[in-house]
Amino acid sequence: MMKTKFKYIFLSLFLILLINCSEDKISLTGTGTLTGKVVAVEDFLPLENVKISTNPTSSTVFTNALGEFEIQDLIVNDYSVQAEKDGYLTQFEGISITDNSVVNLIFEMDVETANNKPPVAPVLDSPADNATDLETEVQLIWSGSDPDGDEINYSIEILNDLNSEILEFSNISDTTYTVSGLKYGTKYFWQVSATDEINEPSLSDVYSFETLPFPNNRFFFVRNINGNNVIYSGDDEGNEIQLTSENSNSWRPRKATNINKIAFLKSNGGQTHLYTMNLDGSDVTQVSSAVPVAGFNLDEIDFSWGSNDSFLYYPSFDKLYRISPDGSNLSQIHQTSNGNFISEVDWNQQTSKLALKTNDNSGYNVTIYTVNLSGVLQETVLDGVNGAAGGLDFSFDGSQLLYTYDISENENIQYRILDSNMFIYDFNTLTSENVSDGKSGGSNDLDPKFSPNGAQLIFVNTSNDGISQKNVLTVNINQQESREVIYSDAFMPDWK
């Protein structure tokens, strides 16, 4: 019995002790401090105003100008520390705080686009690499994409094998782009770059293509654009190519078939000078310098190639000069006897003669005559008449001279021409034939030239009001009703 009693007493005491012990909770005690600094990954410069917070939650602080932060009185525990700032990827670091500890963290934050991938390198689709005989307007086509679906901006860079010129086109959102104004007979190299404005641009391969050879155009004319005369060439089908810039004043084109050059007049400061250029408008070279081209009206002045295109003949007031295409060998070969200005000149290879038109400083008191290379008078074609005249052009064999004359014989201070007709003077019969029978009333035929085969004429027709549009026409000499407009809004034609 005694043993049993002690057994129950011991068991009771154990239960009481157990109950008392279960009421005491086990806990971590003490606090610690978290310090740290936040810098940018790319340059390790401190970042200010970065939000620092913890989980479990404690105080939230922001970094100072030095990128530093501090959280005090953190209860002993394990924490996840978070760094947040607009424009940057959020960073997390794990720490353990023990009693009286000071834990230091360094956050290196990257921009929020750090994980963004660049666009796929563009693939050039058209024209195919090494394509040839392309027009001077080419549509470039490529394909591209972005792994993150970002908007892509494309740029194109085009080089050529002629010079150091670089064509650049940017801010293109589509995958096609049409390039115009390319040069004939030129090899081009093109490359496309793609950017998402986040990563470095992605570059395509480099492809090449070659444009058509420059066409052998036989027509040349002038068109006025924004107040400047601009020279064009064209073919039989009316296709046109602009040869000179709209930013300069160039007119009166004359082709030299033996050397494939075009001579023309061009404004140079306050003067007018002779220039030459290639048939495609390149290699513009000034010819005259010491003596400018000059006369009563620069729009009425004309010059001529001569001696198998080895010389140019041009007027300057009452004097006629000869000069080599390179600007050398300038010499005076003729001067008018009455002080009248020489306005036009044409040379004939077969007869070695020059035809000249002279007039007073109002454009009237006209004389048309021929001289030899020594400047000696040979024949007089037109003299002692009232009204305006001009447009000199020898036939190929030199037996005829084409010119215009205002049969109204009107003279006025505005130099307005009322009824200009085309005439062909025959040196054998010493007679002139009017070849403007098909001309409409109230209009003028101006600036005529023989066609290369001599069967047609090319000329300008316009209203005599002095302000209407001018057009370039052709007509068969023996069928004067066969007038055909070949270039509209054009003047000063040449046909070689």
Image (spheres, helix red, strand yellow):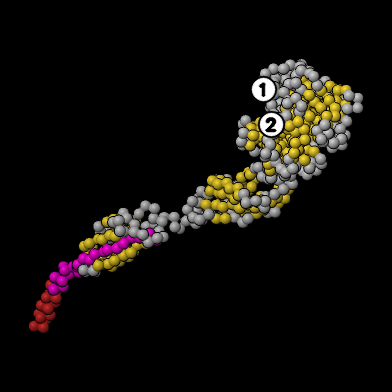
Q: Look at the image and say whether residue 37 sits in the magenta stretch.
A: yes
Q: Quadrant of the C terminus?
A: top right
Give residue 390's position: percent from left, percent from top: 77, 26
Give residue 257's position: percent from left, percent from top: 80, 41
In this rendering, the answer to whether 477 lies above or below 273 is above
For disc 1, the marked residue is 467
Q: Quadrant of residue 115?
A: bottom left
Identify the residue at horizontal 71%, vertical 32% (top origin): 316
Q: Is residue 365 visible?
A: yes
Identify the residue at horizontal 64%, vertical 32% (top origin): 228
Badge 1: few (under 14), some or many (20 or more) residues near its Cα, within 10 Å? few
What amino acid type should be assigned to the residue bearing mark 2?
Ala
Give residue 27's position: percent from left, percent from top: 20, 68
What amino acid type should be assigned to the residue bearing mark 1?
Ile
In this rendering, the answer to whether 388 lies above or below 127 is above
N-terminal-most mark, 2 or 1: 2
Rendered image: mark on residue 75: none
SS at circle 2: loop
Q: Is residue 135 visible?
A: no
For disc 2, the marked residue is 294
Counting every numbered tag in the picture gives 2
What residue span does the magenta drawing correspond to? 17-41
Between 436 and 357, the one nearer to me in the picture = 357
Give residue 42's position: percent from left, percent from top: 41, 60
* Lateral position of residue 337 relative to residue 22, left or right: right
The residues tagged by marks 2 and 1 sit, at their Cα atoms, a distance apart of: 24 Å
In this rendering, the answer to whether 245 lies above or below 95 is above
Identify the residue at horizontal 67%, vertical 39% (top origin): 289
